[in-house]
Image (cartoon, grey):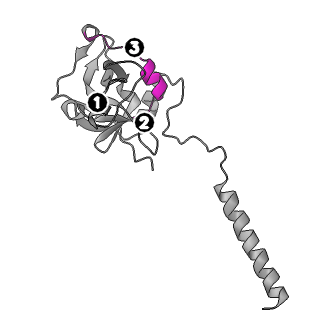
Amino acid sequence: MSARTASGLAACLTLALSVAAQAQTAGPSPAPGHMPVPGMTVPDMAARAARRFPQPVRVGDLAGRLLLQPEESQPVLGRVTGLVRRGDGALEVVVRLDGAWGLGWLGLQRIEWSGFGPRLVAVPVEAVALLGEHVALMGLTPERLRALPSLAPDSVAEIPPDATIRVGIVRPFH
């Protein structure tokens, strides 16, 4: 091989390695449009939810679904237990947060919040979307979810399981 060919080959190899190194360099990535924005209000959540092609779903079919964080690893944040209507008519999804003493010690998927023992919180229906057999938290950050007050059952009316509501859908996050 001639010296000219060897130097050309070395230059091409150097260029290829530098391009590959640049492609793997970590940098700030823009927040995807599906990620919750800190400080979103219910009207903001409703506007985003209306763009998610709301589909009819039976309330009883939502109970038992896992509530997932909208990122590729899809951590479990809680479990849907039902739906309620507040005094002002707003619909909310009831989510059970298991806490540090959840069922992880039984080998089941751990559902975590910062306290001890389970507690129920009410999440606006506009803040969630259907993700296959799961529900994704779209309008709240996990920190805001954990900061929600515990649900007072006497302050809301339970929606019957055979009632139908409309919930947006979302595509997988990976």
Res 128 → quadrant:
top left
Marks 1/2: CA distance?
A: 19 Å
Q: Earlier in the sequence, mark 1 or mark 2?
A: 2
For image coordinates 45% across by 34% down, the residue present is 48
The residue wearing badge 2 is 69
- Nearest-to-viewer mark from 1 and 2: 1
The residue wearing badge 1 is 103
x and y, in percent, of residue 141 in the image: 48, 28
Label 1 neighbour load within 10 Å: few <14, some 14-19, many 20+: some
Which corner quadrant holds the N terminus? bottom right
Residue span colored magenta:
137-153
Q: Earlier in the sequence, mark 2 or mark 3?
A: 2
For image coordinates 36% across by 18% down, the residue present is 116
Residue at the outermost front position: 105
**Label 2 element class:** loop
x and y, in percent, of residue 124 in the image: 37, 23
Q: Amino acid at mark 3?
A: Pro
